[in-house]
């Protein structure tokens, strides 16, 4: 029996990177996966790569109606809130708009999805909510990541607040805190520095293992937290950072 047999899993930002890898990993473990994103081409490619096993549809986590419709369609036992955006800059570089956007996409999006999915989970007496934070959060500070680190720290607070409220209900809520992970947006961020090679060398240098993570390595933790093998775990920020914060 696979670890996620019988579970329905809704994933945000599943078009690429960690979300995509997690969709494939959860499907391989037997879950019925509902992979969502705002990029239809990426979703179409994922559906094809899964040989039609993964159901994909557009869901914009910035829009409450879109989220409510997506949750009503998926009726999830597992909710993986993966959507997030990296703002580059210090406190003196950030505008009000930068902060509002990051808090909306990185934090308030989870408020929207959880608000929509939780009543059904409580009714069924089971559920696992997994929120994407980062090692760069309340765990450690990173230079040039003021808005990002602030928003990802808020994800840990949100996670603990949800976990404690429903601790005896069968619904769990945990956060994932990765170090730097191979993904399409990472390459964009490296290119945006103007010196891709230097930026990549710096990212690798802060990972004591001498490499960045593969998205599949993060997906393996997502599967664990989604499955009943983690049934005694809630309210935790899971650091998976190759020793960056160690
Ligand atoms: P990514 O940034 O490459 O992809 C992000 C996806 O989010 C894209 O497919 C995009 O279309 C989608 N998206 C953007 N806005 C959306 C919206 N409004 N609604 C729904 N989907 C939307 O993927 P990644 O680098 O794997 O990052 C995924 C998550 O992991 C993010 O929350 C990120 O902050 C976090 N994270 C990433 C790293 C890393 O180094 N890559 C490290 C720690 C944490």
Image (cartoon, rainbow, N blue to C red):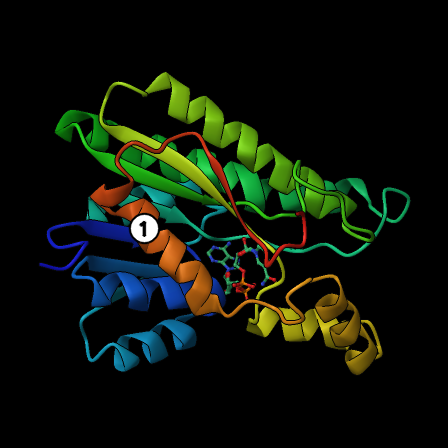
Image location (x, y in percent) of residue 200: 74, 75
Q: Residues within 10 Å of mark 1 (few under 14, many from 20)?
A: some
Above or below for 78 versus 173: below
Residue at horizontal 83 percent and vertical 77 percent from the top: 198
Dividing the picture into quadrants, the one containing residue 19 is: bottom left
Is residue 241 visible in the rendered structure shown here? yes
Image location (x, y in percent) of residue 189: 71, 69
Image location (x, y in percent) of residue 72: 22, 43
Dividing the picture into quadrants, the one containing residue 128 is: top left
Quadrant of the frame with the N terminus? bottom left
Front position in the image: 203 or 148: 203
Lateral position of residue 187 relative to residue 196, left or right: left
Q: Is mark 1 within 8 Å of ligand 1?
A: no
Image location (x, y in percent) of residue 11: 35, 54
Residue at horizontal 65 percent and vertical 39 percent from the top: 139
Front position in the image: 202 or 52: 202
Q: Identify residue for label 1.
A: 224
Residue at the right extreme? Answer: 92
Residue at horizontal 49 percent and vertical 53 percent from the top: 83
Front position in the image: 40 or 163: 163
Above or below for 17 versus 128: below
Is residue 37 visible in the rendered structure shown here? no
């Amino acid at each position: 029996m696979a670890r996620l047999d019988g579970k329905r899993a809704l994933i945000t930002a599943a078009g690429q990177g960690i979300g995509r890898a997690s969709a494939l990993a959860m499907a391989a473990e037997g879950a019925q996966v509902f992979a969502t994103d705002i990029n239809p081409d990426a979703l179409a490619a994922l559906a094809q790569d899964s040989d039609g096993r993964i159901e994909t549809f557009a869901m914009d986590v910035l829009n409450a109606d879109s989220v409510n419709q997506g949750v009503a369609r998926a009726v999830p036992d597992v909710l993986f809130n993966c959507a997030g955006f990296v703002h580059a800059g210090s406190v003196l570089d950030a505008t009000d708009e930068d902060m509002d956007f990051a808090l909306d996409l990185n934090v308030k999006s989870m408020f929207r999805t959880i608000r929509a999915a939780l009543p059904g989970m409580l009714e069924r007496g089971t559920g696992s909510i997994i929120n994407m934070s980062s090692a760069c959060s309340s765990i450690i500070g990173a230079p040039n990541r003021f808005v990002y680190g602030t928003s990802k720290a808020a994800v840990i607070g949100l996670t603990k607040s949800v976990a404690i409220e429903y601790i005896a209900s069968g619904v769990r809520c945990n956060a994932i805190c990765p170090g730097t992970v191979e993904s399409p947006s990472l390459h964009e961020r490296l290119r945006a520095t103007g010196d891709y090679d230097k930026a990549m060398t710096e990212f690798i240098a802060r990972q004591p293992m001498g490499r960045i993570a593969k998205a599949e390595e993060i997906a393996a933790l997502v599967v664990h937290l989604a499955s009943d093998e983690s049934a005694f775990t809630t309210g935790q920020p899971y650091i998976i950072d190759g020793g960056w914060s160690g």
